[in-house]
Amino acid sequence: QLGKGSTGKVYRVTHKGAGVVRAVKVMKQEVFSDVTSLKVIDHPHVVKLFDLFRDEGRVFVVMQLAQQGDLRQGLREVHQQKKLDPKTATWAKQVCKQILLALQYCHGQQSPQVHGNLKPENVLIMNSGPQML
């Protein structure tokens, strides 16, 4: 188990045949209609949703795996260093910019998508590169 939130639990999974590593979020059935609209979102700062399916009152969302954890963990590491150097400031600006670009994209869709629970734990960090919602 990678994490647990108000809507469900997230697990790291590996496809047996292809060896591809993904994250799977298991949620209650009630959120299925909310999640289906996310399949059309394609932006470099939004986690890619690959597939979703239902089984016995649960929804399984197969998505891109965030290798570096979440923004809350990243901010905790910066705090533990007890310094804000130019590299950290640049990183913070980059994170803010990427979050705003992702929100702008989602809100600008023909059928606008609203995150509804934006907080550091829900901003995922991918391989020290782009941050993703």
Image (tube, rainbow, N blue to C red):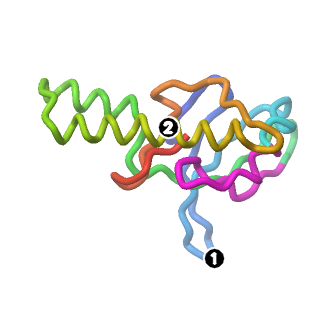
Q: Mark 1 points at which residue?
A: 17
Q: Using the image, determine if residue 39 lies above or below residue 4.
A: below
Where's residue 115, x and y in %?
A: 66, 30
The stretch drawn in magenta includes residue 37:
yes
Disc 2 residue type (three-letter) = Ile
Which image quarter: residue 101? top right
Towards the viewer: 37 or 57: 37
The stretch drawn in magenta includes residue 9:
no
Q: Mark 2 points at which residue?
A: 99
What residue is drawn where x is 77% and y is 37%?
112
The furthest residue to the bottom? 17
**Mark before the other along the chain sequence, 1 or 2:** 1
**Distance of mark 1 from mark 2, alpha carbons?**
34 Å
Towards the viewer: 31 or 97: 97
What residue is drawn where x is 38% and y is 47%?
68
Towards the viewer: 69 or 60: 69
Disc 1 residue type (three-letter) = Gly
Which residues fall within the magenta stretch? 36-53
What residue is drawn where x is 58% and y is 47%?
46
Which image quarter: residue 75? top left
What residue is drawn where x is 25% and y is 40%?
90
Where's residue 7, x and y in %?
A: 68, 28
Q: Count residues near mark 2 (Cα–Cα under 10 Å), then give few for <14, some for 14-19, many for 20+.
A: many
Is 62 on the left or on the right of 88, as rendered?
A: right
